[in-house]
Image (cartoon, rainbow, N blue to C red):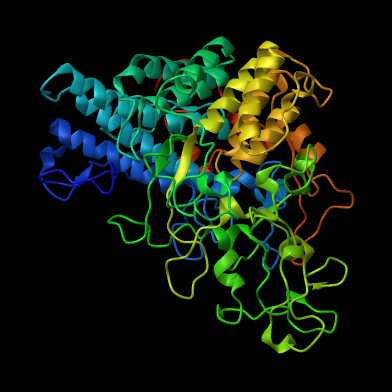
Amino acid sequence: MKLFKNIKTGVAIVVLSLSISACEGWLDPKPMSFYTPENALTTFQGLMTATHMLNRDYRFIEYYPTAFSGVPAFLTEMVFSDLAVNGMTDTNAPPQDLIRQITPSANTDNAANAARMAFYWRVLYKGIGDANTILTRAESVQFDNEEQKRTILAHGRFHRALRYYRLVHQFGDVPFINEEVVTPRFDFYSTQREVILRYLKADLEDSANDMPNVTHRGMVNRGAMYHLLTMINLALGEFDDAIASASRVIDGDTHSLMEHRFGVDSSNPSRNVVWDLHRPENKRLLENREAIYIVLDQFGEEGASNTGMEIMRNTTPWWAAPNQLRTPTGVNAFVDNNEVNNPYLLQIGRGIGTLRGTWYHQRLIWGLDNTDLRRCRESGNWMDMEDLTYNNPALRGTEWYGRNLERGVTLINDTIRNWYGWPNYKLFVGEQRANSWRGGNSDWYIFRLAATYLFRAEAHYWKGNLQLAADDINKVRVRAGARPITANEVDMRMILDERGRELFYEEPRKTELTRISYLYAKTGKPAYTGKSYTLNRFSQENFFFDHIMLVTDFYNQDPLVRTAMGNVYTMAPFHVLWPVPEGAIAANVQGRINQNWGYAGYENNVPPIDSPN
């Protein structure tokens, strides 16, 4: 089996350590450090090892907490979306009152339970700096042949493009740096978003075919290059090119949707292919042809995360703790921290309800049929609180023991945090550590073919090819046992619904909603919201905000939804773009990094440049 672990060269492990801070020196040059010779980036193998570190680092950008009991940055993407809100109600730190809390000066890098915008700024620019170092050093290395150089350039360009794609849809116009920074610089200017995207597109078009179709798991392959190129083509509004690049992945011989049982649990008749697709053990299997690009993290392997994903802790309800759920007679429904007396801890984890799904994600998107395996409670793919039964040993001999929980009967301490449904097939990651039940180490999809189909469907939608869009959506739906849709049902709401069904906790939802909002503003195409939009008022009126207000059950309520700590749930149109961290702007004394409209400092903006810094 081909696996990328923590690949060593014959002499060195390269450690990419360009240090950046959200507050100051976010692009200060600091030499890469090495555990062995300083010439590690002067050979093909040394540069390849450096690209492997970029693959490894990407898992920590999104899905993994940086410490035990931490909150992964990915939750920030989710709460700035239609799919979820922050459900932590016993502190006022979590991002809920977004209008009040999300400011350029807020600590959104590493404050406990807070949003992570500054963290994204810091770690994405770290990866860009490391990719630029690889690309710059590659120009002076003596390779054995041109193919080696082209391979290094392809890896470096992919990682730079992936990170800039995220930045321009989180923050808009940002400084574009395309070479290694070797001396202190404080003269950066924001570059136009579209200029950055066009540069990235040219890079990927030049390098995509330099990647092999099949690589070690955890490494970039040609399918990943074309998948990312599809995302960039869509962001530019170049829909024919998006269809062509997506088709290179879909119609090639390397990738295909997994439509039959495989891997661990494949002999269990109570499970199904949707369950199989998301088992941690199955993501890296070579027979899994749907996987395009994954990050690797298996417990016990060299380089594995110390914390694991803690995905069940953060995404499932706060159900086990004392006094959260009780019988009508006041007895706790469950005992906590005891898997013998409460086997649900092993089966669904010990959640604390940090990421709370909205009604849109739990109910609205599932109304097309009752056959969709992704919402199937009978197989355990989806869990509602009513699927749990009282199992506290203290209840034995009473009418309640073994009885299902029931809304309106069960005493619920906090309906925000204690009571909602979730896709168990996606979020169940078994814990390898004793007495933890948080959600352990697991490989995770970054790109898979189902998303490629849905990107191509979106490109067809923008072109008005609604039957072709329906065909691509139906490839994903039919695999899940859902009824096919018709061309007449295709609009952006349907596309977003299907992505919510298929890609929950995989795609960065805020990033994609912002990208789509730019397209509505650029094209002027009327949206299902009944409105048209323009670029010159992008932060004041946009599809991002209007769509969320139409489907959420938190940010749009009157009176406002209020937590036990007094936080209210608010959102504004300008949250389509996040605030640039104040420290990054203040440290850049010889240039001007622009602030986004709606945040303090916007009044000091200058026109963004149309070239790299």
Left or right: 135 with respect to 335? left
Question: From what the image shows, is residue 377 above or below residue 481?
Answer: below
Q: Is residue 134 above or below residue 34?
A: above
**Residue displayed at 73% across by 14% down:** 524
Q: Who is closer to the viewer here, 439 or 415?
A: 439
Question: Where on the picture, by quarter, is residue 545?
Answer: top right
Q: Is residue 581 left or right of residue 21?
A: right
Residue 321: where, in percent of width, then height? 66, 76
Taking 255 as reference, is 375 above or below it? below
Residue under the image location 58 percent in, 71 percent down: 345
Tell me if residue 303 comes above or below residue 495 in the rendering: below
Residue 603 visible in the displayed image: no
| Percent coordinates x, y for residue 192 in the rendering | 52, 20
Residue 482 at x, y = what percent? 70, 37
**Residue 507: x, y in percent?**
56, 38
Q: Quadrant of the C terminus?
A: top left
Position of 19 compared to 429: left or right?
Answer: left
Residue under the image location 17 percent in, 37 percent down: 46
**Is residue 300 something that shows in the picture?**
yes
Left or right of 258 on screen, residue 79: right
**Quarter of the N terminus within the rendering:** top left
Which residue: 78% across, 70% down? 405
